[in-house]
Image: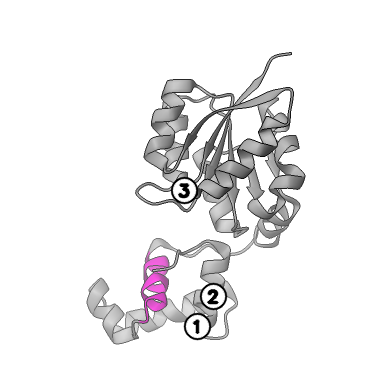
Amino acid sequence: MSMIRVLAVDDHSIVRDGIARLVGTQADMELIAEASDGADAIEEFRKHRPDVTLMDLQMPNMSGIDAISAIRNEFPDARIIVLTTYAGDVQVMRALKAGAQGYLLKALLRKELLETIRAVHKGEKRLSAEVAAQVAKHALDSALTPREISVLKLIAGGNANKEIAVMLNLTEESVKGYVKSILLKLGANDRTHAVTIGLKRGIIDLP
């Protein structure tokens, strides 16, 4: 039986330990290396060339999405599964565009991890049901423009329209227009609601 060689990337040792225990119970897979951030992940991938890489997204120094892009640019056949606590559709699409073949919520590790590893190793794509539902729900939504995302990030930072105008070198009227468009596209009732939706969907991260 050929072994599926796994690399686990997460900045929390408790998550890596959990993965090690799960993988260690299987006769057809082994955990060959671990990494705690994106830069380490790239080095460990180069060193070990794993069959499947498990990648967290929120990590210090270098994000999981940047690490996925870097690994896939260097090794186009790399098979990567995202492990995260976030089901936001925008973040999911970023990860898939970066080259991930699987997207699994950490809450489902014990239930779905081993099956997902085997599926991705065979060349299949796998999304958790909740993740797939979020992507489908927003598939036809109008995406925020880069400028609108910048404005939303500054709103999340607690800045008023006047302050945002100065920071982005815009008129206050322009900022009001962007805010109105953001609320409309996100279906938000107000600025706070827009920030909540933006965080949930992975459009912005916490400032």
Which structural element holds mark 2?
Answer: helix
Disc 2 marks which amino acid?
Thr
x%, y% of residue 66?
42, 43
Indicate which label's residue lies in the foreground, 3 or 2.
3
For the residue pair 152 and 173, the one nearer the viewer reads as: 152
Q: Residue at x 37, y 67 (%)?
A: 150
Q: Which residue is mark 2?
A: 196
Q: Which residue is mark 3?
A: 11
* Alpha-carbon span between mark 3 and mark 2: 25 Å
Disc 1 marks which amino acid?
Thr
* Alpha-carbon span between mark 2 and mark 1: 6 Å
Query: Disc number at residue 143?
Result: none
Q: Which residue is mark 1?
A: 192
Location of the N terminus by quadrant is: top right
Q: Residue at x 38, y 51 (%)?
A: 60
Q: Earlier in the sequence, mark 3 or mark 2?
A: 3
Disc 3 marks which amino acid?
Asp
Q: Are marks 2 and 1 in contact (CB under 8 Å)?
A: yes
Q: Earlier in the sequence, mark 3 or mark 1?
A: 3
* Alpha-carbon span between mark 3 and mark 1: 30 Å
Q: Give, as a single range, the part of the protein colored magenta.
A: 147-158
